[in-house]
Amino acid sequence: GQRVLHVDSRNYYGGNWASFSFSGLLSWIKENQQNTDIKDESEDWRKLILENEEVISLNKKDKTIQHVEAFCFAEDVEEAGALARVPAAGTSVAEEVAEEAEKECSPLESSVPGAENWESEKASSTDPASAEEGNITEINSENESSHNTASGESALELGKPEATLSEVSAQEPKKITYSQIVREGRRFNIDLVSKLLYSRGLLIELLIKSNVSRYAEFKNATRILAFREGKVEQVPCSRADVFNSRQLAMVEKRMLMKFLTFCLEYEQHPDEYQDYKNSTFAQFLKTRKLTPSLQHFILHSIAMVSENDCNTLEGLQATRKFLQCLGRYGNTPFLFPLYGQGEIPQCFCRMCAVFGGIYCLRHSVQCLVVDKESGRCKAVVDHFGQRISASYFIVEDSYLSESVCVNVCYRQLSRAVLITDQSVLKTDSEQQVSILTVPPVDLGQPAVCVIELCSSTMTCMKDTYLVHLTCPSTKTAREDLEPVVQKLFSLNAETEKELEKPRVLWAVYFNMRDSSGIDRNSYSGLPSNVYVCSGPDSALGNDCAVKQAETIFQEMFPTEEFCPAPPNPEDIIYDEDEITEGQKKKKKKEIEKNKW
């Protein structure tokens, strides 16, 4: 029942939650590698400020992204004019690549990255089978064959008649060139932030409750992986997976099922963990008579918590959350939105717009106007010099100036996005959505979360995979994540061991500000009716963002329900002056009918 105006200086929805096509991402990289500050050309807007008012200036440039480095390893990159093939010295190549991509894409795509027509993209793709529960649509994985028939036949003719076509295809993956990546750039939907949705998490429940789920489709994450002793393994997590697993002995299966059953009901057995409340979850696991491999699976692939920083209670809660989400939509607890995580904010935008919300992109705000007597914010002044009044103001953290954030201590996320030619763990089905946690090599270092997406998620072109790596920052993103990339993938396929790994075709590293969890009192001089929302946090799920949105809403409107189910369009009651003659006649007939 509120009137909402959303203004954004960017030319795409979602801020740091956005998704881009390949060329859109290259434009984003180029923009964030430029260090020039935007200065006010005109101060005319200051004439709108009255004597009893003061202003809080806002940032003109987003400074939440740092240390952006992009590299290309694909074939024919020199011919495409992008860069030298192997950036051994760490040369950043975004500008050259962006120029080439801009030539390949349409003017609309260049000027508005991430604003592609998602309906037309869906129409051009194969319609997958879907299953519904609570208005959440899950797209089941499709088995697509991408064997190279020509290379298979030639290999069979060269004296290997016993080799199957699939074996040959596995040995010789299809070559992907840089030109193909640019040409198929609209097939990519590359997220700035990498997350999955817990099937019983707060965001899924909110999507169902608010009926925003009608605007999105989801694919179930198909497998949980672990990295142990230099190898990638699949982790059995459901009851069926545990008993069908060949990598666990029968004794280990019983141990694992007994412990997982305890985790589901741990609150009913406090005597079993009370003595270890102040211990780490890793230390607690050692007391449960679990083998080292089971301890590794539980810590890094089921609970997905830090070995050093997570206490016993937090570990048990994380394990229970994982287990409670199993089976709702598939054999893993996670869902991924088709076309990328950036679809989620756009879904809420669509619902808001249906009920009268107004969204203005490429529309920056110069300042907040504050009344000196009351201390409340009265209006904003935009870059056109217009004064826009409102009762409440919600500002993303990145727009606040340094003077307001002088006492704020930010954390950073290290992010990497890779385009690869094979999966980190090959199976019969190429259409896998996988999550892998790589434990830290040194104590005190963070674990790295790896999410691998296949082409059926509509985030990458056929015969490629999109891989996201995320961890809390200790250094630059490249310094934090490149060692993990080198463990899992081949950058320069020179040795036989490297040839066995999936090959990286293109990569980008960047650091992103984590502004979550900051106390409102840390910001200096904010009026009481100005609320700050943060960017993405480091957690795998979206609970932090949902809790923050609900908290802000309840502070503004304590008597109203947060994101209620929308009314049926036929049940909406309009103001008298908005009702047309036809609607008045229809209403009159209904009243007369009810009399009889």
Image (spheres, rainbow, N blue to C red):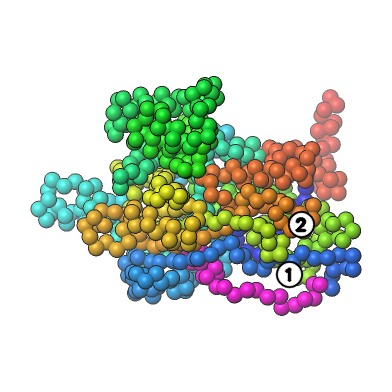
Residue at 28%, 32% in the rendered image: 246
Front-lying residue, 306 or 214: 306
Front-lying residue, 367 or 113: 367
What percent of the width, then of the height, locates residue 49? 85, 68
Q: Vertically, is 570 above or below 114?
A: above
Residue at 73%, 44% in the rendered image: 553
Pointer 1 residue: 383
> Which span of residues is magenta-colored?
19-46
What percent of the width, then of the height, locates residue 248? 30, 31
Pointer 2 residue: 526
Number of other residues with Cα within 10 Å of mark 1, as a class: few under 14, some 14 to 19, many 20 or more: some
Front-lying residue, 35 or 124: 35
Label 2: which secondary element = loop
Q: Amino acid at mark 1?
A: His
Residue at 37%, 30% in the rendered image: 290
Label 1: which secondary element = loop
| Whole-number angstrom distance, CA of label 2 to CA of label 1 | 21 Å
What percent of the width, then of the height, locates residue 352? 69, 49
